[in-house]
Image (tube, grey):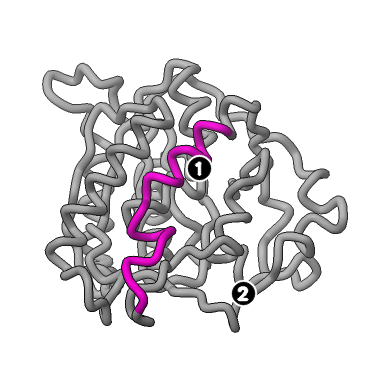
Amino acid sequence: MELKVGPEDLGTDERSWRAGDLLDGLTPFEPGGPGRVLVVAPHPDDAVLGVGGLLQQLDWAGWVVDMVAVTDGEASHPRSTRITPDALVARRSQERDVAFGRLGVRPVRVSRLGLPDGAVSEREGDLRQALGERLDTAGPGGRLGGAATLCLVPWRHDGHPDHDAVGRAGAAACADRATALVEYLVWAWHWATPSSGDIPWSSARRVDLSRPDLARKRWATRAFVTQVTALGPDPGDTPPLPAAVLTRFRRPFEVVLV
């Protein structure tokens, strides 16, 4: 399930986010390592939007990247007249693979859990166990870098029910193992405001992106065709991620919470 945004509900605009020095003054993120990082995405596009630049930097720094795809994103267009949920599963998985190829990041292993899009919270206990197993397991013969030393998950208060459930499960699994947890923002940029205190800025860190980092991330984002373009003229075929939303993910930096 995606939170579709229409022209009447564009949330906090990018001009408001960039008006002051709040984001510019954040402490840089220092990941340490290298080691093995597990990136967890509720839907096929979330990791690219939230931490596509950081993933490039970790990959280039020698980190082993594994990924967990929690849902297949089949509920992004529940009222579509042009595409079925089954077709969306195939399309969105392909879009994710293309996007990671454009980033230049090839996860060593992608675990597709197939949890129900829009109802992850109903399987939160199962998800916590599944993430724990993947934090512990390095892959066949232990050749993929050992247990994960870093885990990237959506912020547990991001504002989308699936994101929040994934964030809670990831935080619990990491706490069980003392694995370093980093949370990324996707929908919080829509509903929060710079002055409200909704986001814990004391925990926020900034990931500056080089021009090549940013170019690759923008190119990767365009791979999610079903999410950024209209599938047809009917209201059920409008894109979940219109231009006003995408602007927040075209910044020359990303923000994570540690």
Q: Amino acid at mark 2?
A: Leu
In the image, 196 versus 90, the foreground residue is: 90
| Residue 10 image label | 2
Hey, which residue is sitting farthest right in the picture? 20
| 39 over 229 or under it: above or below | above
Please report the bounds of the magenta region as a residue range.
215-233
Residue 191 appears left or right of 167? right
- Residue 216 rendering spot, x and y as whole percentages: 50, 32
Q: Amino acid at mark 1?
A: Val
- Residue 85 rendering spot, x and y as whole percentages: 17, 68
In the image, 7 versus 21, the foreground residue is: 7
Q: Secondary structure at mark 2?
A: loop
Residue at x 38% of width, y 41% of height: 39
Quickly name the residue at label 1.
Answer: 51
In the image, 218 versus 38, the foreground residue is: 218
- The answer to if 228 sits in the magenta stretch is yes
